[in-house]
Amino acid sequence: MNDVLATATLAVCRARGERIVTAESCTGGLVSASLTAIAGSSDVVERGFVTYSNDAKMEMLGVHAETLEAHGAVSQDVAAQMAAGALRRSNADISISVTGIAGPGGSDHKPEGRVCFGLATSEATVSCTIEFGALGRSIVREKATDFALKALRDKTLG
């Protein structure tokens, strides 16, 4: 876990007066764990959802079955719905979602290391895909966690 990055993310969100909610799949709660490892994070971290299965994504976050069928769980469309759903189902001001293929495995269509992110506020929901590559499960999850923390800190996926 990157304590320096998590601390900076909390400080920036605290200064903006924003509460955070996470919606995680392939990172399995690592984004929330990174944030809550920092003492005093409870004034910024509102809650986190770990939605590893498609059923959990639908039940807990309101991801549409049609979206999952059309695009698969590892898609920008699902990441956007995860982020928007987490925001709707919390008292937070900003949400981040992570869904991807940490590995091992993948396919030609969706290779290992592909991770999709969603970021939602009351103003907008955006999503993006990052190809981390077949770096191994632990490294992909670490890089995805760091990217998510930076997205929350910078309030952008760019």
Image (cartoon, rainbow, N blue to C red):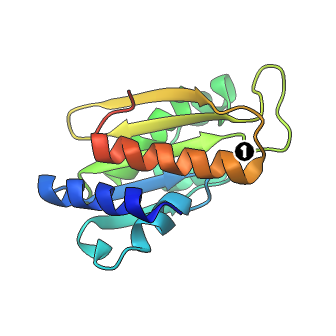
Residue 34 picture location, percent across and down: 47, 65
Q: Tell me the residue at 38%/41% (across/down).
A: 151
In the figure, 114 relative to 19: above or below?
A: above
Left or right of 5, for residue 62: right
Left or right of 29, for residue 55: right
Q: Tell me the residue at 26%/57% (across/down).
A: 92
Q: Quadrant of the N terminus?
A: bottom right
Q: Quadrant of the C terminus?
A: top left
User: Does the rendering let one see residue 151?
Assistant: yes
- Residue lying at the far front in this picture: please name it: 4
Q: Identify the element where label 1 is drawn.
A: loop
Residue 157 picture location, percent across and down: 39, 32
Report crowding for label 1: few under 14, some 14 to 19, many 20 or more residues within 10 A (C-alpha): many
Q: Which residue is mark 1?
A: 102
Residue 9 falls in which quadrant of the image?
bottom left
Along the line of sight, which residue is nearer the eye, 37 or 20?
37
Left or right of 66, for residue 105: right
Left or right of 77, for residue 8: left
Residue 73 picture location, percent across and down: 65, 37
- Residue lying at the far bottom in this picture: please name it: 39
In the figure, 33 relative to 141: above or below?
A: below
Q: Tell me the residue at 65%/33% (across/down).
A: 132
Residue 71 picture location, percent across and down: 64, 25
User: Does the rendering let one see residue 90?
Assistant: no
Q: Amino acid at mark 1?
A: Ala
Along the line of sight, which residue is nearer the eye, 78 or 66?
78
- Residue lying at the far top in this picture: please name it: 109
